[in-house]
Image: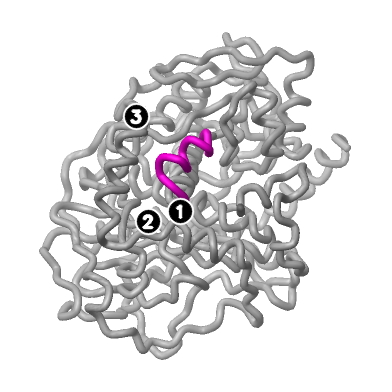
Amino acid sequence: MLHDSTRHGEAPGHPERLVPFRPLDPSNRPSPFKSYPDLSAVRLPRTIVRSSVPATEVLSGGHGPAGALDDELLGTLLFLAAGVTRFTAGGLGGEERVWFRTAMSAGNLHPVELYLVRSGVHHYDPLDHALTPLRGSDEVSDPGGGATLVLTGIPFRTCWKYGERGWRHLWWDAGTMVANLLAAAAAHGVATRVVTAFADDAVTELVGIDGVEEMPLVLVELGTPAVAVPPAGSLDALAARTLPVAPRVLRFPLVDEAQAAGALDHAGVAGWRRAATAVSRPAPEEVDRPARAVGALGDQAVEDVILRRGSTRVFGTERAPSDLLEWTVPAAARSAAFDAAPGATLIEHFVNVHDVEGVEAGGYRYSGEGRFEERVRVDDVRAAGAGLCLGQPLGGDSAFTVFHAAVLGSLSSALGPRGYRVAQLEAGVVSGRLSLNAFALGGGATGLTFYDSLVSRYFHTDASPLLATAVGVPDTPPAPSGSPGLPVELRGYGNVMTRLAARLSRSS
């Protein structure tokens, strides 16, 4: 019901269920950070542990030598997944500062929170690069050596702008964070497992959230063995007080229902996981490294790529080299370390190619193993690309735009509402990887929204788009990036936005 009522370009399936409200109300702006005013946080080491293998090797599916998962490496992984790297002194809507983080987020709203389960339960403060203890080690058994990260979503942070469609963004944003985490962990040889099938009520209780205003999304296990989640009802409720996310937190019934419909209890986890494994399609875990890079970047490390990455605001329209398409997409579409689809995938990808060396412009379906099947020829492919993306110039100025998609009818029949969740999450992982891959080659990338049904008709497919990623040659160099707990101020951000406004004006 939520998907049918949040498609751009067509009447909602259930308009009476949508909440009327004022989007982007500056008087009700959500706080970008969760705060526990009565608890003291413990700062993590403000260093980044350097990896030793080239980013393109890791992003192709390789691994670095195994490192000890000590506080320094844990802090590095947390920062590269969710840390604050940049800020501007003022922005739209009257906020004093705008914060930018290591992972992509729709509208730069960052609704995803991160908790560490190891020697107790801790909340990660991305601005101060610190851990706030919530539970002691006596409450959560610690096998030693491993850790579990819990990603949760605060719907109102993104619904404040996007309404009910914002629930989709929780999964996209969690996926881009997971993409960073998987790449950074692989670079240091840390084993990972992305847990999509878990008992929602047990995880909700573990980290002390209500499951409605903040809801569990996904777990990531680091190292072996990882920390097991205690069963629901075995832990006392947390007494820690948090500050409200906004002056007036609005509730969206369709969001609440969509989340509740996909919940699993302990008894349903194993069966759902088997069903997901059965319907997933094989996908490689590793691909060949690119033959060459776009820029003179050499063999930079994953942490350098993550810190270079930002959402590209303006693309140059010159021709892109072939590797920017022929490596980045296969490397992004590799199987993730999902518990529900090991060595496989639940989604597919459609590519509108605008200007790439050696590739005819047009619409393609990526069919796996580096193959692209042509689907569409149009006279003005750039105009078509922008048109699919709500008329946004980035959708056509890019070298190509990828639409990550799934056949929702068959997915729901096999996996129920939780299948929709996991497909959205995987789309976020692929989008996050695609962005990292582009920056590893000196390119740029950004996520875009789109006309849902128009994309399906354009590519002649029954699959529904879940997320779109535009990739191309950036018109400006990457912004500088700070270190853990020490973000840098972007002083030229206004100039970039002025150029973007001029590009928008010319296209209208």
Determine the residue located farthest toward the front in the rendered image: 413
The residue stretch that appears in magenta: 406-417
Residue 310's place in the image compared with 89, above or below, is above
Q: Secondary structure at mark 1?
A: helix
3 or 2: tag closer to the N-terminus: 3
- Can residue 335 be seen here? yes
Write the residue at 45% across / 40% down: 413
Give percent across and percent down for residue 218. Answer: 37, 56
Looking at the picture, tell me which residue is in the foreground, 248 or 278. 278
Gap between marks 3 and 1, in whole Å? 21 Å
Which residue is identified by label 3? 60
Looking at the picture, tell me which residue is in the foreground, 371 or 305. 371
Relative placement, left or right, of 6 versus 261 is right
3 or 1: tag closer to the N-terminus: 3
Nearer to us: label 2 or label 1:
2
Write the residue at 36% across / 64% down: 200
Which residue is identified by label 1? 174
Write the residue at 67% across / 51% down: 6
2 or 1: tag closer to the N-terminus: 1
Amino acid type at image mark 1: Ala
Which residue is identified by label 2? 218
Give percent across and percent down for residue 119. Answer: 19, 72
